[in-house]
Amino acid sequence: MKPRPSSMRRGIGALGAAGIALLAAGLVPLTAAPAPASAAPGTPAHAVQDLAYCSNNSLDRGIGVSSPAVALPFPIGYFGQTHNELYVNSVGSVSFGSPVTEPGYDDGVGISEWHSEQIAPFYSLLDTSIAGSEAITYGASPDGSTFCANWVGVAAGDRYDAMGIPAGTNSFQLLIRDRSALPGGTVGDVDVTFNYDSVQSAGAHDGFFRGFAGMISHDEPNAIWRTALPGSGVLIPAPENAGLPQEISVLTDGQEWALTAGSLNSPGTLGRYTFNLRAGQLPTPSGSLSGTVRDDRGRPMPGAIVQASPSRYNGSYNMVTTDAQGRYLLPNLEGSQLVIASPAPNTSYLWPKSVQVSILPAEQKTADIQLPRPNRVPPEGTTLTKLDGTLVDSPKWREATIMTVTACSSGSVNFGIYAPNGRRVWSDNMVPDTQNRGLYRATIPATIDLESYGPVELRITKLCPGELGVTTTTDLYIDPSGTIVDTADKPVADATVTLLRADSPEGPFIAVEEGSALMSPNNRKNPDVTGTDGAFAWDVMAGYYVVEASAESCHAPGSTEATVRTDVLPVPPEQLDLKLVLECAEPGEVIIDPAPETTLALELGSDSVLPGAELALTGSGFAAGEEIAIWLHSTPVVLATVTADPAGAVATTVTIPADAAAGAHRVELRGVTSGSVFAALTVADPAGSNPAGALPEAAKPAPGLASTGSDMLPAAALALLLLAAGTVFTVRRRGARA
């Protein structure tokens, strides 16, 4: 082990100072927002993906161990070098060229030269020889598109603790995905993803370089951090009587820069950070934007999502979540940017806000954003209806809308629709109602493509004799939509529609959590249920989406699958007029499913479980290496995502949600290519009795799980605000229900 310099000391010490010095020198471009308050101190995230191939190989147990050279299924372009193999290290990194067995030290310029070229989800001291620690594992996906390394359930080591007491346990993961096949891609293009479930300690190793998360590359004579997450390298004294280690990293759970409480380009999943390496480099813009998001009363708003994209959208975006003080930091920006702040969950009373900024190279710009309350839609004294008389709260996408306004009987009323730049999109004089004095009517035609103008305003001016004209201005939300129909093109009512999201077109696609700030406050319910018109919709931030639908007595046309789904939908651009088709039985009709092309099987360890219980299951008949989502119905929820073994089989244990309703349910194994298979499951009432005796072992509640519920709110609208940047996918249930 290389001797440490004499300048190393306890407390914040040279490690913290070195980290700060690197930040100040610009050697560590910040690439994530501060930790949001939505994750309580010590609360584990759920970012680590359960992928079978991640456990194909294991490191020897111990401290300071590494794998042999591992051949990669694809080359990695890395800051001027191309690598075809790597080493997996117990110091929380993978390295190129040689293994790394000890955390290095920093001399104020760079990392010691023998520790160059690393990707480090959490550069730290780990010891798998400690009792209770899991092994470090790694492997490649069967299709050769992804390399994975797991440091899950691994003990943090303490070099100076002769008793071998662990300093804490960490669970984090590295995924490197080949992106060379994307449009405009080149060989070596990859996405690098850090996933964190729990980070308790960087280990105790006096004075040495640890508690970092980022990428290191060689730059003679030393190596430098090409990028590091905020808080990297900063150590603070541990609370008194906390036991060893005496220093803790600010990246650990519950600290200011907790890795489990932030995200980068993955705002739907706390603890997930995605970096795009293209042509061997990270994004090069050197400017940044920071500030505070506040509510309408000026109070800081934790958990809001802030997204920036070029005014001339080029397919890129930068997205972060505000911290406990409502602060955000958007790195790697340059030029004209449209910045959109979306209110946090449980803030249905607020409206999103956009600001236009121009950022010069290397400029560190600031912009505070205050979220407004929406104006009333429709305005007081105004009603909006479809042609059939159905009341609606806003004009309909590509449908004529009748507007009725109350005013003085001897006056006049006119209205206009205006784009954000003040341009008049449409205007007209309203016609007095000959049957009802004081009522004025007008039709907003279906031919006006209001969506193309982004956020718009409705201005109604009332002119009465002897009075000044009164103009009412209100925000106007135009409703794009998608529809669930049967094979006769009739709307399907009460269909369950679920929105799934991924950070890349290859997935994995996970259901967006109900209430998530990724969705407009106008509709944060997921899954949703269609009305009699079969329509559905959400307004969302940028990303890749899939919509799937199912309904009672319906199935996919010509298939046994119970659900249908769209192709992958990149957002932006906006995705409008989607149509999903189900084959449904008429009342009393017996559905005869066509013979399946392959035989899928699913067997449950028990046919009855309690909420919060673990359930063992096995499945077969899938393709080798196929990704399989495990769903629980009736209210659809993804329990886990697994990978079929070479024989096309899966065997795993899942946890039934603690708030699952008592009654009949179905478990579904859904393969990406092979389709679905179902099995019936009864969720027992915890307050009831079990006449058959005690539940089997597989149905007992999982330890530590409590029965909880959550109240998710609907709320205001985001669609047109985001459309100005081309960053909205809108598919919303039309109209109001009686």
Image: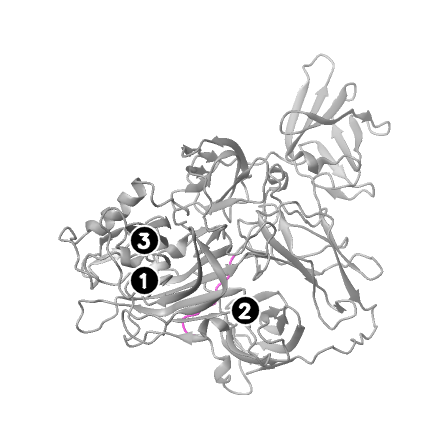
Residue 707 on the magenta span: yes
Mark 3 or mark 2: name the one nearer the start of the chain: 3
Viewer can see residue 595: yes
Q: Which mark is residue 641?
A: 2
Q: Residue at x 73, y 42 (%)?
A: 392
Three-letter amino acid code at the position of disc 2: Thr
Residue 642 on the magenta span: no
Classify residue 166 by image quadrant: bottom left
- Prevalent SS, magenta region: loop
Q: Over which residues does the magenta segment extend?
A: 703-710
x, y percent for residue 440 = 79, 27
Q: Label 1: which residue?
A: 200
Q: Of 515 and 567, which appears nearest the observer?
A: 567
Q: Label 3: which residue?
A: 255
x, y percent for residue 644 = 57, 75
Three-letter amino acid code at the position of disc 3: Gln
User: Does dot 3 land on a helix, a strand or a loop?
Assistant: loop
